[in-house]
Image (cartoon, helix red, strand yellow):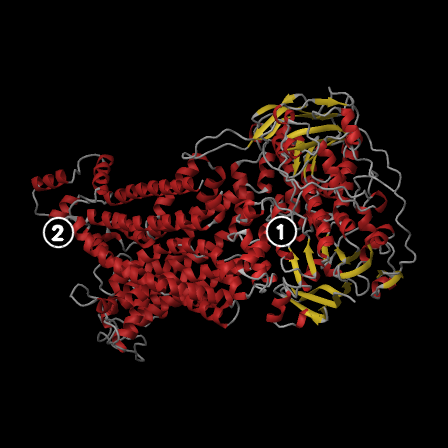
Amino acid sequence: MLVGSGLLVVFLIVSVTAPWWAPHGVAETVDTPLMGMSWAHPFGTDVLGRDVFSRVVNGARDDLFLSIVSTLVAVVVGGIVGLVSGYVGGWLDELLMRVFEAVISIPLLVLALLAIAAAGPERSGSWLLLIGVVVLVYAPRVARMARSIAVDLVTRDFVLAARLRGESVRSIVRRELLPNATGVLLVEFGVRAGYTPILIGSLGFLGFGARPPSPEWGLMISENRDGLLAAPVIVLAPALSLAVLVIALNLCADGLARYLGRQAVRTP
Amino acid sequence: MSLVEVEDLTVDFWTGDGWANVVNEVTFQVRPGESYGLVGESGSGKTTTAGALLGFRRPGSRVRAGSVRFQGRDLLTLRPAELRRVRGREAALVPQNPTTALTPNMRIGDQVEEALQVHGLGGSRSQRARRVLELIRQVRLPDASATARKYPHQLSGGQQQRVTIAMALACEPKVLVLDEPTTGLDVTTQAQIIDLLARLRAETGVAILYVTHNLGVVAEICDRVGVMYAGELVEEGPTERLFERPRHPYTRGLIASVPSVVRPERTRAVLHGLLERGELPPGCRFAPRCVFADEQSFAEQPVLEEVEPGHRVACWHWREIPPLAETAPGEERIEPADTRDGNGALLGIRELDVTYGRSRGLLLARREPELVVRDVTFDIRPGETFSLVGESGSGKSTIARTVGGLLRPLDGEITFEGRNIARTVESRDRELRRRIQLVFQNPDASLNPRQRVGRIVGRPVELFFGLGGKELAARIRRLLEDVRLDPSFMRRFPHELSGGERQRVAIARALAAEPRLMLCDEVLSALDVSVQATVLELLRSLQEEHGIAYLFISHDLAVVRSLSHRVGVLYRGELCEVGTVDEVYAPPFHPYTQELLLAVPEIDPAARRAPTPKVDTETAAGPAATACPFADRCPVKVGPVCDVEPPPWRATSATHAIRCHIPLDELRSKAVWPPARE
Amino acid sequence: MIVRLVASRIALAAVTLVAVSAAVFLFTEILPGDIAARVLGRESTAEQRQIFRDRLHLDRPVYERYGIWLKNAVQADFGRSLVSDQSVTAIVAPKARDTLFLAAFAFVLYVPVTLLAATLGAAFRGRAVDHVTSVLTLVGLSLPEFVLGLLLIYVFALQLGWFPALSVIGAGGGFLDRLQSTFLPAVTLMVAMSVYAIRMLRDNLIEVLDSEYVRMATLKGVPRRRVVLRHALPSALGPALNVTALNLTYLIGGVVVVERVFDYKGLGWSLVDAITNRDTPLIEAIVLLGSAVYIAANLLADVLALLLNPRLRTS
């Protein structure tokens, strides 16, 4: 947890401040292409002769912010829909769950690709689309989980007691269900946030995420992969940055789960 | 020569920020063939001590000192391989909850056989199979070979417990360690298991260490008893002497807390306060709750002293402590205003039928609804306590929930203050919701863990009376005082309270609505004996102060007797006897009432009954196939008429009726009551 | 009872599959812009476009087109590729075979690795083995498939030269050659799946090992190994099956990325191509196929878990 949040803070600082101290611009051709590590270019230069170090530090913003914002939206939306659906029950619940079940049955990455195909691949650079895709992929999964919590909670005596008092649906969801679900939802958020950079990176790698000349890491790796033999560092630097970011997020999720006395369950 | 010698056993648990002591310098012996009872409330360390007899300690605990010698060998220092040969072979466990203690995907026979197999006993495979059947028969399970092929979930709780007993007996061990073996069972099933254990002890000569919180059970089966408090053995002696003349103030209080089904005198809460683990004094651990404690008690630890042969007590003041008062004459119960007149009923229930069978989903075919409650009729007058008593599955909680509006009845009428209210809570008006309050069985589940006590208790006040701000705070404070809790509890969360305190909060929440009728659904069963007594006292005084009527749901016949004005006995969803408390607890009895009464273990030596032979029967849940629901289990069944013809209600007075084919005179002559005394 | 349960699971899976097909159809059909214009190019005449639309029934309402498509899809006819005009089924079938080979290879590696690591971790909880697996799985689940794949290529193909960097298939070669050339992608997929499964199965096993019946067995004198194998493992296996089926979502998604990394021309590769080219019938077919595999696997796991559970089997 400590290591995780420490790393995360470093990532945050880098992502916010990078534009001010990065030695070069992200789209700037500064030197001969495919140079290895050197003092001038610690992470070498890419196929177009851009400074990889500058691109990597600037890319932190894309991957970190995109991940956290999109996951947050997905968990909030999915959580509320799931809780209400589970408490109210009946045909609406039945219908929602069938729909979510169907969406979940399309494998995660394939669903993301499908959504991008639907929006038109040429729009794939937009942050809004990426956030939308993550929400579409996660929200049904979060909703299904939140619903199972709600279904478990509604049979608990304290919810029955609230019903006996004649509390409204809104009041029961807000006062009785939500406070008891926040722990699980927080852990869910942590775990999902840990996977989002992988999802966004994968989309970037496949060419459906960020667009050139964005310094998004997945895209960068895909652009630089032909230089793997000549200058390994230009692939390894963004790759390791991505991996360390995900490790940091996962450590935080595990720590959070332990703190809340729950298990970090990583269900797809 | 002792079989087991526990000496100075001291065990600590890791709490996350340090070691907490749970068992402190406990010393006792179990002799060959003897039955030794270890009694205490939750947190007394009795289960940890019992585990040590099998060389077991929970993860996160350590044995700081002491030894557990079994025939001379110290089990606590034995190597794992040697220990394995003792477990099951020399000392065997009968667990608390057989449902979770049997491996779900292994057949019964295989599990029993495994006990033999892993110790290389029982000879060849076919010889072992024969021995397994023999064992299953020995614990009096029906149709041994069919039972052996079953999986645990196909047996009832009582049958499962018989299986674990068979498993424990498989290798003919020298001692059985029984860890609360009847806690989850119905009272009649419990009586059968106790009876079985007594017989097996006679047959095999096995020694028994019986760990329980139930004093009555100990009184029935144990030769000697040790009483534990906060990890220490505070008193030990022969069962008869200990119950007759307890020397330790804690033992004394514990015994006085247990209501008796035979003697209806009011029990008074003699034990004050609660076990506060964090604030144990260096001296006697009971001192903070003891009325006899002085400076010495707090400062110096008392050691076990012999007060008479075999009877030892750890108390500085045992000489000054008077014997248990000859039970005080029963105080007059305050009768509700009009006990005899049916017109003034607060709650009236007529021919109530309830079912759970609301099938939903598209693929499942609708089935005939199974009635959980059938044709139940009774009423409750203002300020009266009406109790429904019955075993699990009898439908008593269902009735409370239907009255509360959580379930919609299939048929029948429920009237409250003359109005029909047979509908769910959502369609009742606010005033009605306010006047009927429900208190749940388990306060852990009925209080929202994320709300503070102030909020929990204050919410109904806010909702029903629209109070806020200072007025609300004052009301909450008064409600907490009403249930004898300190106003500082307002800021606490439920998990910071003990079980008894939580149940008080739940009662305060119900009280906040100023109800006329309180539905108490097994409100005592999750609590320790001494806490039960205080909550019982609280309920009684609240009724006197506020004139609230109770529908009191319980399986505990003694508690029901001490609290109720009138009682209804419920079996498989149907009432079989209704009357005032004195009438129901006196002959003539319905055969089922009789069976229940005989099953209750009794601690009072003077009131101990002659042992009655127990018939091995199963309490079936759900609706009966016979006209009289009790017919397939009835020891005095008349004949086929019981199966086909619904029994008639036979009234002995204006207030008491029994539903049975047997005439009242015959029932009276068959009654075993009052208990046989020498 | 059990028959009814199984039947209802099958019915539910069928309903889900139909719902998925509708979702997939909707997604691909709401593509913005005039498909005809884009596929046929700007120079095409209005007449040509009309013919194209007629052939695909593009002028009819969506639900009608869905009906036609579904009817054909049931008969394994997904129409023709908009790009190459070949039958989609003919394009997909050989690719599916290659992808299946890769996935099966990964799966064969997955089972023993998962079982071994999880059982060891649970049996030696809190000891070195457990910590090592826990750290390794954490690292594993933090490495995206394309990063892991590239790392493997760099170390084992470019530096050590043990395996080819790209898995070009179809150029003859025996079974062993094929195994060698698909080893790295299979390992990548295996890691992507098993890191999740190991963690879950370990936690499950620990829960079962903490259960009262396991303690009871121990206190009965049953040796540790027998306790784990006879009392604990069977109970943990049902959930493990379900986890495995759920994990196929990573396998199927991973296939897309891994095929791209290793230039393995299977279904995943085709999907990416199809999306780039907006080859709607091909996208629909591949996505539906992937979902169907996932649904079928989950159904199978569900039914197996039901059969493994005596509580459901015997009542």
Characterize the local packing of mark 2: few (<14), some (14-19) or many (20 or more) Cα atoms within 10 angstroms. Answer: few
Front residue of C123 and C230: C230
Chain ID at mark 1: B
Is A47 rendered above or below residue B298? below
> Rounded to the nearest whole Å, what is the CA distance between mark 2 and mark 1?
68 Å
Can you give x and y, in whole percent of width and height, for residue A211 in the image? 26, 59
Residue B512 image-quadrant placement: top right
Q: Residue furthest top?
A: B343
Measuring 19% from the left and 55% from the top, which residue is drawn there?
C94
Q: What residue type is labelled 2?
A: Ser
Secondary structure found at label 2: loop
Specify whether A30 is left or right of B206: left
Secondary structure found at label 1: loop
Q: Mark 1 points at which residue?
A: B97
Name the quarter where the N terminus of chain C is drawn.
top left
Residue B70 image-quadrant placement: bottom right
Is C270 rendered above or below residue B484? below
Q: Do the residues labelled 2 and 1 touch (CB within 8 Å)?
A: no
Residue B644 shows in this picture:
yes
- Which marked residue is nearer to the observer: mark 2 or mark 1? 1
Can you give x and y, in whole percent of width and height, for residue B92 in the image? 65, 60
Q: Name the residue under label 2.
A: C84
Q: What residue type is labelled 1?
A: Asn
Residue A51 shows in this picture:
no
Is B582 rendered above or below residue C75? above
Can you give x and y, in whole percent of width and height, for residue B585 in the image? 78, 33
Measuring 38% from the left and 53% from the top, which residue is drawn there?
C246
Same chain for mark 2 and mark 1? The answer is no
Front residue of B383 and B659: B659
Specify whether B562 is left or right of B136: right
Characterize the local packing of mark 1: few (<14), some (14-19) or many (20 or more) Cα atoms within 10 angstroms. Answer: many
